[in-house]
Image (spheres, rainbow, N blue to C red):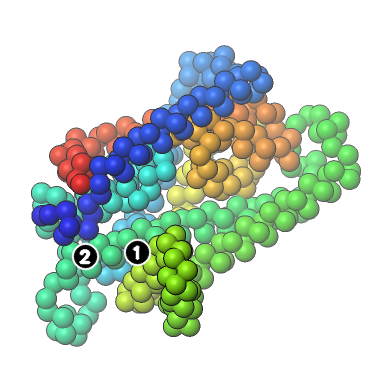
Amino acid sequence: MSQENDPTGRPNRRLRKSLIQSAVLACVGLAFLVLLIRLEWIDVSMLAKAVENNAHWILLSGLAQVVGLTFALFRYRSLLRANGVEVKLPAVTNATAVGTALGQWLPGAMTLIEALRIGLMFGAHNVQNLSQQAESPDSAAKSPSAPSRIEVVGKLALVGFLDRLVGLSVFLATGGLILAFLSTTPIEHMTTAATWEDQMTPSSSWNTQQLLLGISLVSLFASLSLMLIPGVATSKKVLALMQRVRDWSARHNSRMVQRVLGAAMALALSMTQSRIRYRSLLLPLLLSLFSNLCFVLNYKFCALALGADIHVLHIAGVIPFIGLASLLPLGFGGIGGYQLVAVALFQPFGVDPTSIASTSLLQGTVVLLTQSLVGLFFLRSSLPQVRAILQRG
């Protein structure tokens, strides 16, 4: 198949650009690690003792990560089915595992990773991996011919967008609800620090509770806004407005606005054609909830390995924002500036910065190694396809 006709094709320069970005981010992450060690916020001896004496907690952390990824995998497959696309489970598992692992090593290459996942589900050497299910006998009678690969790729791109939307909205909703609960709890009950009374005055304690309440309200509003996107985007008025803005940008030669609006309109049209219903998102939302619980346990087990006293509710309230921070170019594979972000986010609960930074570093390392090992396991059978997709151009 030629490059022009292959919707998953990507030029080699994107791969080179992603590799350069990874190298730069690795340097940034290393610089942050040196800073944290000099601040004595990362205790290397504590990490060494955890590996030596508490390896069982680290293994449990990795297992929790694998279970969480499994729930996320079934969330993605349920969204595929909700959009009328049936992909065999081995193909979905292979594509998701390899794509997630490469995403750890190629941060910032979301487009490339999504193209890789779509390409693996197509099966470069086995196009029968992918099939389209008719929604009803009537629709099958009206459209007896199979849809083109471009149409199916469009649906897969829409599913990728919905997968991230559902995961992020549940993340923000659970974090917002827990922070709202913690904001109503007396501040001395929100921390395990023995010297909390020496750290906080009544007035700063009240300010902390108000801060947590404000963050929770913003988080819940953001979650609700994300979940409204499938309904709002299919509105004819919204599509007409986007078209007018796109026409205006064309007259003023604003290429970036045209690209953004073009992608948004393509997604909106895909949603309209797929007839997204909110009830079809109930199972993905539930699977996201279980996935998030596993990620909280992943963090908690790392804290237990280090002997750090961090309450599980504090982790559940903060981890969604640590996840959001992972979108920022602060390091590589969850290691680097993200440990500083974790220290800042846990500060209202009076947790020792050294405990937080060390736990965050251990957790980031566990996630990186676990997802890489899982990806390598599945990469053995799909290496030719991955090489073809990455080198296509």
Left or right for 91, reference 63: left
Q: Residue furthest front?
A: 252
How packed is label 1: few (under 14 Cα within 10 Å), some, or many (20 or more)? many
Point 49% across, 49% down: residue: 292
What number is the disc on residue 174? none
Q: Amino acid at mark 1?
A: Leu
Comparing labels 1 and 2, the label whose residue is closer to the camera: 2
Residue 77: where, in percent of width, then height? 31, 58
Quadrant location, the N terminus? bottom left
Mark 1 = which residue? 158
Position above or below: 160 against 335: below
Residue 52: where, in percent of width, then height? 48, 15
Residue 203, quarter of picture? top right
Q: Amino acid at mark 2?
A: Ile
Position above or below: 140 against 207: below
Q: Residue furthest right?
A: 202
Q: From where the camera sits, is residue 284 visible?
A: no
Mark 2 = which residue? 150
How packed is label 2: few (under 14 Cα within 10 Å), some, or many (20 or more)? few
Tag count: 2
Which of these two is toward me, 333 or 351?
A: 333
Residue 246, quarter of picture? bottom left
Residue 6: where, in percent of width, then height? 18, 57
Residue 322: where, in percent of width, then height? 56, 43
Point 25% across, 42% down: residue: 12
For the residues marked 1 and 2, what is the alpha-carbon distance in whole angstroms? Answer: 12 Å
Q: Earlier in the sequence, mark 1 or mark 2?
A: 2
